[in-house]
Image: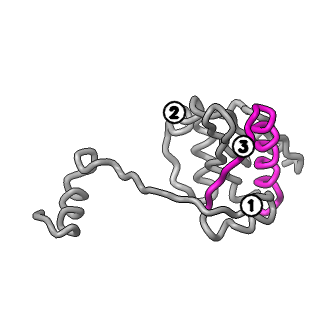
Amino acid sequence: MSGAISYAWRDPIADEEMVDLVRSHGGKAVAGWWRRVKEHSLGWVGARDGEGTLVGFVNVAWDGGAHAFLIDTKTRGSHQHRGIGTAVVRLAATHARAAGCEWLHVDFEPGLRGFYVDACGFRPTDAGLIHLPPPAAERGPEQASARRRAAGGEA
């Protein structure tokens, strides 16, 4: 295997490659996810090793104006801690700027603060989040009954 990594904006990535990348670091892969999501993106960055295997990825969503959002940053488990994640984020930032975006947003779990703030240069900010689970009618009957019981209602 070659040590050279290549990076490409809007790299043609097959859904099967994305599933493999997610599973490579223990993530929960959903077949068909990438096919549905990519149509809503400003773009994305793919990183490939010398054999063409997808080893890194980041998606850039946007509002069509000044704001872009990094989501789904991933590095193949066997390739982590080699600067690949930082490189895909930097290339994503370059292309978001070229598209006219003024701000690049990201949210992350506390354990990733060193990566996003220290390695990638994001500035910490306050932000808000609302969890939007599907309505009870779209969940299985077991989940809906458990939620009603937890809220003090009838099962």
Answer yes or no: do the residues labelled 1 and 2 have beta carbons within 8 Å?
A: no
Disc 2 residue type (three-letter): Arg
Query: Is 128 contained in the magenta span?
Result: no
Q: Nearer the viewer, mark 3 or mark 2?
A: 2
Residue 87 in view of the camera? yes
| Separation (CA) of disc 3 from disc 1 | 29 Å
**Which numbered disc, 1 or 2, marks the residue that appears first in the sequence?**
2
* Three-letter code for the amino acid on which mark 1 is drawn: Arg
Identify the magenta region.
80-108
Splitting the image into 4 quarters, where does residue 67 fall? top right
Tell me the distance, in whole angstroms, between the alpha carbons under discs 1 and 2.
30 Å
On the image, the x and y values in percent for residue 128 come to 53, 59
**Which element is circle 3 on?**
strand
Q: Quadrant of the C terminus?
A: bottom left
Name the residue tied to disc 1: 123
Q: Is residue 47 visible?
A: no
Query: Which corner quadrant of the image does residue 81 belong to?
Result: bottom right
Residue 150 in percent (x, y) is at 22, 69
Query: In the rendered image, which residue does mark 3 sit on?
Result: 54
Q: Amino acid at mark 3?
A: Leu
Colour scheme used in the picture? one colour
Which numbered mark, 1 or 2, is in the foreground of this view? 1
Measured from the top left, where is residue 127 in percent x and y?
Answer: 58, 59
